[in-house]
Structure formats: structure tokens, C-alpha cells
Amino acid sequence: MYGLDAISAHNGWQLSALGISIVFTGLMILSLIIAQIHKVLEFWDRKHTYWQRIKKLVRRKHRSEETASDLVLPKNVKESTHRFKLLIEQMGEPFSLPKLLGFSKKCGILHSRSSVNELLRAKLIIPDGNGYFLWNHEIEKNIKVSMKTSS
Amino acid sequence: MTVDISLIESLDIFADLKPAEMEQIASLMHKTRVTEGEVIARRGNSAHTCFIVLSGNFMISFNKGRAITLHNKGDVMGCSAFVAPFNYTGTATALTNGEVLSMPGQDFLSLIKSDPALSDKIMKKINEIISDRSPFLTGDI
């Protein structure tokens, strides 16, 4: 048996169709991979930036998980907290942060800016979203509780 | 102090730049130490320089007693150096000792004029910062 009859008898048509489909599938996969290579190269070029972003996200997550009880105010700030609170009570809430700093300087509070910064970091002073600030009574309670329990 | 490109890479505002673009930006930057209470930009003065926070804590005060505080690396102060009429709209004061990157506004503008792609990437971020802060300037919150 020769020619087309032999091809048909030994599944030649099916085998050639299978071969063609395997080759074309392979070519398609290869072309898809090549089409995405620029993304891999870009990622490789900017791996430091991505790594920094991941680190930043992790840092932000840790910061948001930080609770009031975790916050430890330096001793000198604990002392000035009461004086700042009195000033804020006099000014009324919401208050202007630059004005608070001005008053605290007049009252002779040492390192008033860094002390206010500690209060901001401890979330005892919080922004109201309109450019003014509020005294956070909830955090104050928590800090008092944690101070009592630690003493 | 000269600025290393890895430092530029770590800043959000320059995150989308290519390494060659970062090198161009790094060549314009200078590291400066600031001390508690130091005023690094004063409202109404000509805005020659933009500052990027590396460490420390800062307050920007606007009119009518409004203010915002900046505590994170990459926070930007003095965007007015890139925008007409080139006058600072707020007073930036260091609340603690820290370190900033300073960038002369005119040098930066010359650089982005010669590179529209770079201009698009950076000005987009600067516009975002300005639009976030503009309510504090106008009081329309």
C-alpha cells in the first residue's frame, strides 16, 4: 500500500493535524511569553522601588495597628501635656496649632514644638480635617489608664 | 551633600521615574539638616526651593491659623517653587530636628522643559499634592 491510502490507513492525517496543532500551540505560548517580557524586565529594573513600596506598606500597617496603650510619652512631655491641655481649654476647640505654639512659647514651655510633635505622634492632638486641631479625650483617658496600671 | 540615587528611588514622588531620570533629579538635590524651630519657607516669600522630608517632623501653617503637619519620609513642602506666581503659600517650620532634600525650582523647571515625559510623571504628583492642600489655603473645605 502506497500514497494517500497508506497515509489514511496509518492515521497520517490525524497525526499531521495533531503535529500542526502542537506546533502552533507552542508558538502561541512562546509569543505570549515574549509579549510579556517587557513587564518582567521593567519589574527587574525597578525591583528596589517595589521593595521600598512593600516596606512602606508594611510600616504603614504597623503604624495603624499601634494602639494608644502602646504609646509611651517621654517624661518631659507628660509634664507639659497638662500645660498644653490648659492652654487648649483656654483657646477653645478646634484650635489653631500655630497659635498654640505661639501661646506655649509665651508661657515659657521649653521645646514647645517638639513637645507638640510628641502629642501629635501620640494622637493626643489630632487634625479636624479643616486645618485646625482637637484634643483627643479618648486617647488621654487610655494614657491615664496605662499610666495608672504601670505605676 | 550629594544625593544617592537609591534615596531618590525610595521617595514616592519619584517612584515612577526611570533610573536615568532619577539620576537627573538626584543631580539637582542637596541634603540639608534642619533644627527644631527652623523656618525653611515663609508664606509670601519668593519660592525658590522645594523641600522633601527625609526625617523629622514639620508644620506648614497657612492663613487664618490653619496648619497641617508632616511626619513621613517623602512628604513635600514648597511646591510653590514649581507653580506661578512662585510665592510660598504657607510657612514651613521644623517641629523637630531633621533632614530634608532641597531642590531649586528653576533648575527643576529647566529640566522638565527639556523632557516632557519626565514633566508629566512629576507634575502629576505635584498637582495631586497641591490639590490636597488647596482647601487649607482657600478655606473651602
Image (spheres, rainbow, N blue to C red):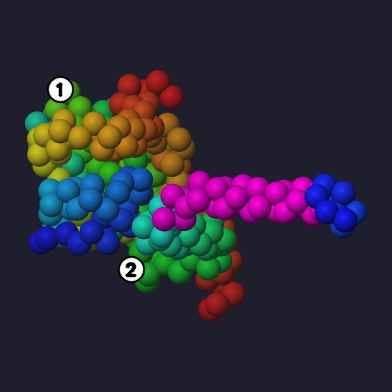
Of the pair B105 and B62, the residue shown nearer to us:
B105
Q: Position of residue B117 (x, y in %)?
A: 27, 34
Chain where mark 2 sits: A
The residue sitting at the front extreme is A1
The residue wearing badge 2 is A76
Asked where in the image residue B107 lies, by quadrant, the reply is top left
Residue A33 appearing in the image: yes
Give, as a three-letter code, the residue at label 2.
Answer: Asn
Expressed as whole percent of the image width and height from the top left, the position of residue A56 reads: 44, 58
Q: Which residues are magenta?
A: A12-41
Label count reads: 2
Q: Secondary structure at mark 1?
A: loop
Q: Amino acid at mark 1?
A: Pro
Name the outermost residue toward the right: A9
Residue position marked by numbered label 1 in the rendering: B85
The secondary element bearing badge 2 is classed as helix
Chain bearing tag 1 is B
The residue at 83%/54% (across/down) is A2
Q: Residue at x 35, y 54 (%)?
A: B72
Quadrant, the C terminus of chain B = top left
Residue ID at (45%, 69%) = A72
Residue A136 visible here: no
Tell me where residue B59 appears, x and y as whole percent. 28, 45
Mark toward the viewer: 2 or 1: 1
